[in-house]
Amino acid sequence: MISRVFKLRMWTPVGVLTSLTYCLHQRRVALAEPGGADDQNPVDRSLLELKMVQVVFRHGARSPLKPLPQEDQQVEWKPQLIEVPPQTQLDYTVTNLAGGPKPHSPFDSQYRETTLKGGMFAGQLTKVGMEQMFALGERLRKNYVEDIPFLSPAFNPLEVFIRSTNIYRNLESTRCLLAGLFQRQKEGPIVIHTDEASLEVLYPNYQYCWNLQKRTRGRRQAASLQPGISEDLKKVKEEMGIASSDKVDFLVLLDNMAAEQVHKLPSCPTLKRFAWMIEQRAVDTASYILQWEDRESLQMAVGPFLHILESNLLKVVDPATPPSKTRKLYLYAAHDVTLMPLLITLGIFDHKWPPFAVDLTMELYQHRESKEWFVQLYYQGKEQVPKGCPDRLCPLDKFLNTMSVYTLSPEKYHMLCSEAQVMGLGDGE
C-alpha cells in the first residue's frame, strides 16, 4: 500500500529539485569565498532585507486526549469552554494539497468517540486556545506588518501559504491565528491545505511509515519500565490512587495536567505537586519511544517536513524561481510531537514539552550589498542559535548543512520507511 501510494505522489517536481540542487551548490561556493559570512566582522543588520518567513506552530489549548481513570479526579469540560470569541471569527476553506475536496479526518472521528466529564469531546480546541492563537497572530502582525512592512495589512493569498494537519483543532487554531495576524481583513479567499492521513508529514507518521512503526512498537509501554521513569510513575500513581494495572503513563498525566492548568481548572493536588517531574518524565518517555539519539528515527519522524522547509528556502534563493511559485509567509499548523524532533534536529531543544500555541519561526534574509543569505531562528519569540551556526544570524549554507543531516526527500523517505518490509521484517504482530 505504501509503495503504491508514494509512486503516485511527488512533493517537488524533478526539474525544480535539479535547479535547487544547483542553486545550493552555487551558494556554498559563494559563502565559502574570502570576505564572506565566515569573517569575524559582524553583519550590519540594517543592510539585511527580509525575504521570507516560515512559522511552524502547535495548536492552541484543548481538552485532554484521554481522561484519567478515576472519575473523582476528572475535571468538568463543559461546552461553555468552547465558545468562539468574536474577534477570532473568519471564513476559510479547506482543500487537499492539489486544491480538491478536504480529505476525511480519521483522528477527529476517533476523538468524538471519547466524551469527557462535562460533555466535551477529547482534543477539542477551547476558547482559551482560540485566544492563544489570536495572540500569536497579533504578535506576528506586530513583527511583520507594523514593525516591518513586510506583509500586507490584509490577508493576500499571493503572499501567504497555509498548511495544516487535517485535524479540526489545528484548522480552527489556524483560523484564529489569521484573524489576529490580519485583523479579520482579507483581499482574497483563505485556503488551508491539508493532506490525507496516509501521506501526512507534519507529524511522525507511525501508522504509514512501516520502519518507524516497527522501531517504536511496544516502546511506549516499555518506557514506563525504564529505571527512574518506573519509580517516579509508581510514586505518582500511588499518591493519586491509580491502580498499577491502569494504562496511565507520564504522557497521559502531562496531557491532563497541562490542559487543566492552562484553563485554570481545579487540577488534582498530586499533579500540581509533581508538575515539574511529570513534564520531565514525559519528555524522557517521548525520547525513549522515538529514540532521539538515532538519526534514522529522527529522519523518519520529521525528515520529510524538513525537506519542505528546506525547499521553500531554496526556491526563494534560486533566481530562476518565478515569483508566483513562492510566498512571503508559510504557515504550518502542527503538534507537540512535530516540534520536539524538529527542535532536536536543529539543536535548540530545551528539554521542555512544547506548550500550547508555541511557535518556531524561521526568517530568511538577504544582504543588500554582498547578496549573501542568512537565517534567523526564533522559538517562543526568543532568538536561537541553531547547531552548526556561529551566531543567531546564521549563514544560510551553515543552516542548510545542519538541516541536511536529517532532511529526507520523498524518495528517500519512502525507501527508509519501507526498509523493514524489504528486509522481510513485515510479518510481526
Image (spheres, grey):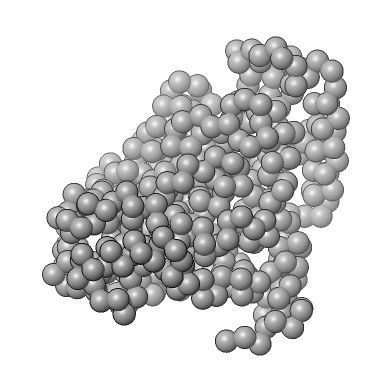
- For the point 68% across and 24% down, the residue is 366
Q: Where, quadrant-wise, is the N terminus in this rendering?
A: bottom right
Residue 127, compared with residue 148, is above or below; it is below
- Give the image location of residue 202, x and y in percent: 55, 57
**Where on the picture, by quarter, is residue 416?**
bottom right
Residue 154, compared with residue 60, is above or below; it is above
Residue 392, compared with residue 274, is above or below; it is above
**Where on the picture, by quarter, is residue 49?**
top right
Q: On the picture, is 83 further left or further right than 191?
A: left
- Give the image location of residue 104, x and y in percent: 48, 72
Residue 397 at least partly seen:
yes
- Give the image location of residue 174, x and y in percent: 42, 49
State the residue in front, 204 or 274.
274
- For the point 66% across and 87% down, the residue is 427
**Where on the picture, by quarter, is residue 392?**
top right
Q: On the picture, is 322 further left or further right than 261?
A: right
Q: Where, quadrant-wise, is the C terminus in this rendering?
A: bottom right
State the residue in front, 414 or 244.
244
- Give the image location of residue 277, x and y in percent: 33, 52
Residue 337, compared with residue 427, is above or below; it is above
- For the point 76% across and 79% down, the residue is 423
State the residue in front, 227 or 218.
227
Q: On the picture, is 200 further left or further right than 270?
A: right
Residue 63 at least partly seen:
no
